[in-house]
Amino acid sequence: MKSLNIIGIGATALLIASPAARAAAADNWKQHCASCHGADGTGQTKMGHKLGVKDLTDAANQKGFTDDQLFKNLKAGESDADGKVKMKPFGEKLSDDDIKALVAYVRTLSK
């Protein structure tokens, strides 16, 4: 049970990050993610439709990936089965802490 408590505390800490961290994550979302995923995360953008971006406000879509998977995709980018880049990597532009904050931000988009 102790390990579950530690995991729960870690996840909660991400979600209740400082107001400054939440604001920075929102700014990074606007700068790096909103052009495809939309300001609201629904993916209702020209690029979002072209790339088949999933609606991140849909809880079922959010259950389809873990925080670790999202972190890795944000850091290293994502390609389709043919190797075509679907999402460019942000590991050179954003720190690991910035990427972790973006992961937490994405989780807040779910309805």
Image (tube, rainbow, N blue to C red):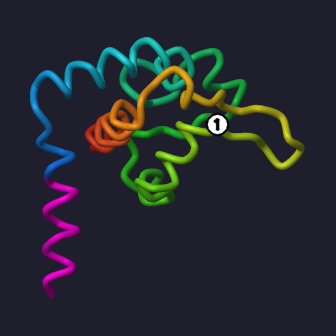
- State which quarter of the image contains the C terminus: top left
At horizontal 26% and vertical 20% (from top left) the residue drawn is: 24
Q: Quadrant of residue 87?
A: top right
Horizontally, residue 14 falls left or right of residue 99, namely left
Q: Quadrant of residue 102?
A: top left
Horizontally, residue 84 falls left or right of residue 13, namely right
- The magenta stretch spans residue 7: yes
- State which quarter of the image contains the N terminus: bottom left
Label 1: few (<14), some (14–19) or many (≥20) C-alpha neighbours in 10 Å = some
Residue of label 1: 77
Question: Is 16 rendered above or below residue 47?
Answer: below
At horizontal 77% and vertical 32% (from top left) the residue drawn is: 85
Q: Nearer the viewer, residue 34 or 57?
A: 34
Q: Amino acid at mark 1?
A: Gly
Q: Quadrant of residue 92?
A: top right
Which residue of the protein is positioned furthest toward the bottom in this rendering?
A: 1
At horizontal 31% and vertical 44% (from top left) the residue drawn is: 107
Q: Position of residue 32 (x, y in %)?
A: 49, 18
Q: Position of residue 28 (x, y in %)?
A: 38, 19
The magenta-colored residue range is 1-12
- The magenta stretch spans residue 3: yes
Secondary structure category for the residue under label 1: loop
